[in-house]
Image: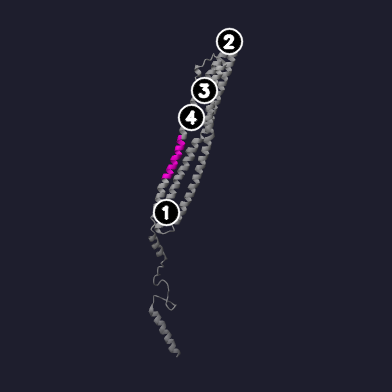
Amino acid sequence: MARLNREDRNFTGSLPDLKASVKATEHQTKVIDRKIFIVETHFPKVAAMLQRYAVGTAKLRNKGDELAKTIAAYAEEESPSLKQALTTMSECLSAIQDQRDAEVSKIEEKLVQGLSVYDTKCKQARNDVRVSSSLSTREVKSFENLEKAQMKSTDRTRIARAQAEFQKASGEANRSLRVLREQMNEFESQKMRDVKQIFSGFVVCEMELLARSMELYTRAYQGLMNIIEEEDLEEFNKSMTLKPTQWGSAPALSNAGRYVNPGNGRENVLEEVEDESDELNRTM
């Protein structure tokens, strides 16, 4: 931004000279207005999209938590090595969602807020521009009054008063322009620092999530590759084998289709045969 050396201006010059100097000031004001307009237009849009990104990430985090819980519940019903692999996968998924949760918090609490404060900053900057423009306009009017007094009046008191008013207006305009220039330099510098910090923070969040996800997904993959099918099949086949009941705990079915007490064994069968023989002899 070109510096306007108003202090070096010859205030006893003509009105066109003053207006030419003021025109240079107006050009600077337009440049400042444009810079403010850019921030006012784009920062709210970027902040809104970052907020939507955070909401989308939060939804994905919630779905990831649900998936992790579902896999964990399924793992409890499975055979040993498969259960271990699924449990590891569930834990890894849950840890990834923790990383996503941290990203959501950072985006909402730091990045979006860092952009949102520029709504207030832009309003303040525009107010500073209006004040400076108003003082520049008053300077021109006071100079016009001084020139009229010098041309149409011989009253030295009136001319001196008009000259004092002009000097005062000119000094206020000079100070206002200098302050505005300093404020806008600070505005631009702070804006660039904030943009750098906000977007680098976003990139770091994404890199941390990707790095952590790669680490955890690798662990989950290794766990799945460690499933020992033979051992789980052996466990499955063992589970299908019915364990025999202990003797004496329940009646057993004989080869003849009758229930006998396994505790008495063969002696009970012989006794039944002898009883049937005695019954036959009595009948004969």
| Quadrant of the frame with the C terminus | bottom left
Disc 3: which residue: 177
Mark 4 or mark 1: name the one nearer the start of the chain: 1
Q: Position of residue 66 (x, y in %)?
A: 48, 51
Nearest the eye: 112 or 265: 112
Disc 2: which residue: 157
Nearest the eye: 123 or 282: 123
Mark 3 or mark 4: name the one nearer the start of the chain: 3
Disc 1: which residue: 87
User: Is residue 124 visible to us here?
Assistant: no
Q: Is residue 143 above or below residue 77?
A: above
Could you say which disc has been placed on residue 188 in the image? 4
For image coordinates 59% across by 16% down, the residue present is 144
Residue 202 located within the stretch drawn in magenta: yes
Mark 1 or mark 2: name the one nearer the start of the chain: 1
For image coordinates 42% across by 87% down, the residue present is 278
In the rendered image, the residue lying farthest to the bottom is 284
Our reading of the magenta stretch's main secondary structure is helix
Residue range corresponding to the magenta coloring: 196-211
Nearest the eye: 264 or 242: 242
Disc 2 crowd rating (10 Å Cα; few below 14, some 14-19, many 20+) is few
Tell me the distance, in whole angstroms, between the alpha carbons under discs 2 and 4.
46 Å
Amino acid type at circle 2 is Thr
Left or right: residue 47 versus residue 262 is right
For image coordinates 42% across by 54% down, the residue present is 87
Mark 2 or mark 3: name the one nearer the start of the chain: 2
Q: Identify the image quadrant of residue 79.
A: bottom left
User: Is residue 20 visible to us here?
Assistant: yes
Tell me the distance, in whole angstroms, between the alpha carbons under discs 3 and 4.
16 Å
Tell me the distance, in whole angstroms, between the alpha carbons under discs 3 and 1.
68 Å
